[in-house]
Image (spheres, rainbow, N blue to C red):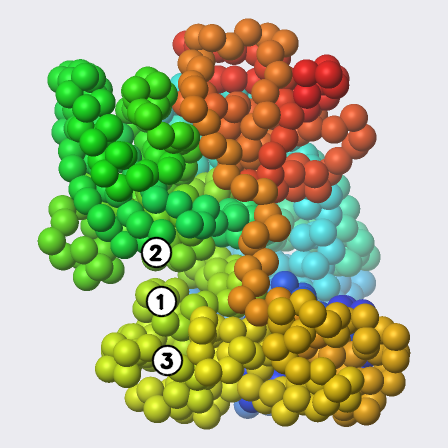
Amino acid sequence: MNITETLASEFGLKQVFAENIVNLLDEGNTIPFIARYRKEMHGSCDDQVLRNFADRLKYLRNLEEEKEKVERTITEQGKWTEELAKALSSAKTLTEVEDIYRPYKPKRKTRASIAIAKGLEPLADILQKQAKGVDIKSEAEKFVNEQVPTVDDAINGAKDILAERISDDASLRKTLRELLFDKAIIECSLLDGENKLTYETYSGFKQEAKKLPSHRILAINRGEKEKCLKVSVVVNPEIMLKEIRFVFKKNNPQTDEIIESVLQDSYERLLFPALERELRSNLTDNACEQAIKMFEVNLKPLLMEAPLKNNIILGLDPAYRTGCKIAVIDKNGDVLDTTVIYPTPPQSKTEESIEKLKSLIEKYKVDVISIGNGTASKEAEIFVAELIKHVSRPVSYAVVSEAGASVYSASKLGAEEFPDYDVSLRSAVSIARRLQDPLAELIKIDVKSIGVGQYQHDMPQNRLTEVLTGVVEDCVNSVGVDLNTASPSLLSYVSGLNMSIAKNITLYRAKIKGFKNREQLLSVPKLGPKAYEQCAGFLRIVGGENILDNTAVHPEAYETTKKLLELFGVSLNEVTKGETSLEALVKLKGEEKVASELNIGVPTLKDIVSEVQKPGRDIRDSMPKPVLRSDVITMEDLKEGMQFSGVVRNVVDFGAFVDIGVHQDGLVHISQISDSFIKHPSEVLKVGQKVEVKVIGVDLAKKRISLTMKGLDKEEA
């Protein structure tokens, strides 16, 4: 089975679709472009399926390259056999290939290699054959010399060689690897490390390796790294030795004792330590993939939260000693004014701060106040709730995550965008913009700093960045980008573009005083025909020369769109203004028939019809709107049985954290999410989702709030 056949089988695709995807990727097409504009070629797979496909394609190609390398190396050694060819051909993983190559791989100095250098390999062959009637001591005497002083030295050298051969047996290693995973217990004991109290729950901890959840594996690893935990892999050695004895049977009473000692030595000195490291490594790799998956699952809804359009927003970055930084932005996100107030301890200049913000709110007609959820957030929230009572115009507030805001503020990008502002004022602008357009603002931040997962610093950083960047790309391209207002940061995530081309676009945009049509992109330096093909459909021009430039219809389909309209005798203006339902006309005639007449696929036809009917639409407008408040409660106000409408802020393996308007998010444990059995919280919840919850526990000392979504009072909810 070749690679495309394997991929077609694994992803449940037609062979031709798998071949098309491989070809499209090899031609340099991006995932967003393939997903949106080549649906007929792959059966309308979504972005995520295509990314998984691309990852798997990369792995399988690496596997094939490794197989070729192994075959070439063993052949050069003159040791290639049909048996090896068969084993290598059937290997499904890189680990299996490594096992096959192990006996032929140049080794560092080992006990076995030393014995081989002394000429003891023939004695090891005799020992391995266990031929009856052969006196091993008599045979060993033949190898005694200056390098091998005694018979025992000769036998011990032969044993070392045989122990390494057993350890290098690919089939045996595979069997033992699977057996260890099935039977191993992970045990922890508490050490006297600096943060030992953090890991008290793992004192005397024991659990089957195969049942360890990913968050627990990562917690144990961190505890071990911080020298607070000693971690052991425990398994009954007899279970493992039984498998080794089955492969290397003892059949000569004269050598039984020697062979048994070889088997035990091979297991204890070579096999178990290596397999133990492999098991821990595999558990960690799988846990990291699961954690990265949770980042991926959480990041998308966070980026796709509905923007708060057409509002003047005041951003408030809370602090104590240095004061709360304030920035007012207009409906386009441009900064109107900045200041600093001191309503929090130690200054506590509440009245002065109220007067200052009242003046700004009235002057700029502020609609909403966006408060960062970091240090002093609760005090700032209480202050804002009081402020609202003194303002004549209707004003509400929202608390937004400020994760990564300080990273952005101190970054080169932040300095380029606001060279005249200090770091803290940039944070205030970012906090305001996060409410106004979460996607446009959050993409400026290193995705690893957004804080919607767990143990992000313990992840393989390249892999985490790769996956999360893919999520950002999918979100940006599914929403579309306003070509005449987008920042270089936002443009750089558009299919086919990078930061260099994005900056060229903004420079050219300034030069021509705004793009009038998509074709002008071809005049941007370094933006060639291939980049244009990839990016054009995702860039929007509001109020341009062609209405289609404000839709996701690709320029390559403009002529088809024209023919579609002519087919029904309607104009583009009639359709875009809602005077005629193109969708109804197409359905009346039959989608298959219309698509056939236009020589396109039904998926492309549907996309064109949908886009033409609603130019400039933002798919995020259908998402839940931000929760706006005008009053505040404290953690001390909470009582068991209280019910709240909340917003999911983070989903992790063991539950979800929900913002109920208190400074501290509450935890809905996985057991409290649903009356039905669920394997993972993400089956039910996602970041940004509005939920009804009830308080079932409040621990003021530890600042923990326990919530449930079960057994709610329906009238209250």
Q: Is residue 422 left or right of residue 693?
A: left
Nearest the eye: 479 or 194: 479
Up-down relation of residue 243 to residue 644 (above or below): below
Up-down relation of residue 357 to residue 246 (above or below): above
Question: Which element carries disc 1, helix, strand or loop?
Answer: loop
Residue 225 percent location from the top left of the image: 39, 38
Earlier-in-chain disc, 1 versus 3: 1
Dot 1 and dot 3 residues touching (CB under 8 Å): no
Question: Which element carries disc 2, helix, strand or loop?
Answer: loop
Nearest the eye: 328 or 673: 328
Q: Which residue is mark 3?
A: 515
Question: Which element carries disc 3, helix, strand or loop?
Answer: loop
Alpha carbons under labels 1 and 3: distance apart: 10 Å
Check the picture and name the quadrant holding the C terminus: top right
Within 10 Å of the Cα at label 1, are there few (<14), some (14-19), or many (20+) other Cα atoms? Answer: some
Alpha carbons under labels 3 and 2: distance apart: 18 Å
Q: Residue at x 74, y 19 (%)?
A: 714
Farthest residue toward the left?
A: 420
Q: Residue at x 40, y 73 (%)?
A: 483
Q: Which mark is residue 43?
A: none
Within 10 Å of the Cα at label 3, are there few (<14), some (14-19), or many (20+) other Cα atoms? Answer: many
Dot 2 and dot 1 residues touching (CB under 8 Å): yes
Q: Which residue is mark 1?
A: 485
Nearest the eye: 616 or 166: 616
Residue 10 percent location from the top left of the image: 76, 69
Residue 690 picture quarter: top right
Nearest the eye: 474 or 542: 542
Q: Amino acid at mark 2?
A: Asn
Q: Amino acid at mark 1?
A: Thr
Q: Which residue is mark 2?
A: 332
